[in-house]
Amino acid sequence: RLRADSSSDGESPHGGRRHVDGTMGEAMAAGVFRLQMSDLDISHATYTEIRAKPEDELTVKEWVQLRMHEARTIQKAECERLRSEMESLRDNLYTAQVSKDACQRQLDRRDATVDHLKEELSLLQTRSR
């Protein structure tokens, strides 16, 4: 279905499977894997060029590059949507805090007025006796 990419097929140039053992081999394999994966990030122009090919002519690497680009594009759009939503929620939070502070000040003024009126009433009641 997909053509095999000969640079990453795991075969040695002499026809046998490569054998890697020990931590040195694991580190080397991890390094090779990282190098191969670093090529997966492609530009939109490259994506369009590869996307124009029939799927049965794609190498495994090209197929993975297409899927990675599509997934990354979706993730970027979702990230931007969430960033925008977060900014909107921050604005709403700020507005709510300002409103709460204004209500608290108004409540404090009314409490002070009530306390003052209670004192006046008490004083008037004391004078009227």
Image (cartoon, rainbow, N blue to C red):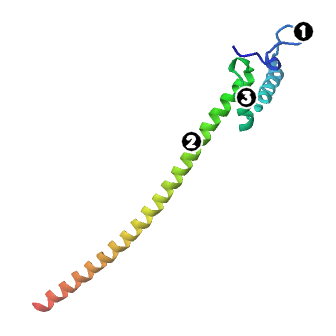
Tell me if 79 is positioned left or right of 29 in this view. Answer: left
Residue ranking furthest to the left: 129
Vertical relation: 75 (above or below) 83: above
Name the residue that disc number 1 marks. Answer: 14
- Which SS class for mark 3? helix
Q: CA distance from mark 1 to mark 3?
A: 31 Å
Tell me if 71 is positioned left or right of 24 in this view. Answer: left
Q: Earlier in the sequence, mark 1 or mark 3?
A: 1
- Which SS class for mark 1? loop
Tell me if 88 is positioned left or right of 67 in this view. Answer: left
Q: Position of residue 111 (x, y in %)?
A: 29, 75
Name the residue that disc number 2 marks. Answer: 78
Task: Specify the label residue 50 is tagged with.
Answer: 3
- Which SS class for mark 2? helix
Q: Residue at x 66, y 28 (%)?
A: 67
Q: Nearer the viewer, residue 46 or 88?
A: 46
Q: Earlier in the sequence, mark 3 or mark 2?
A: 3
Q: Quadrant of the C terminus?
A: bottom left
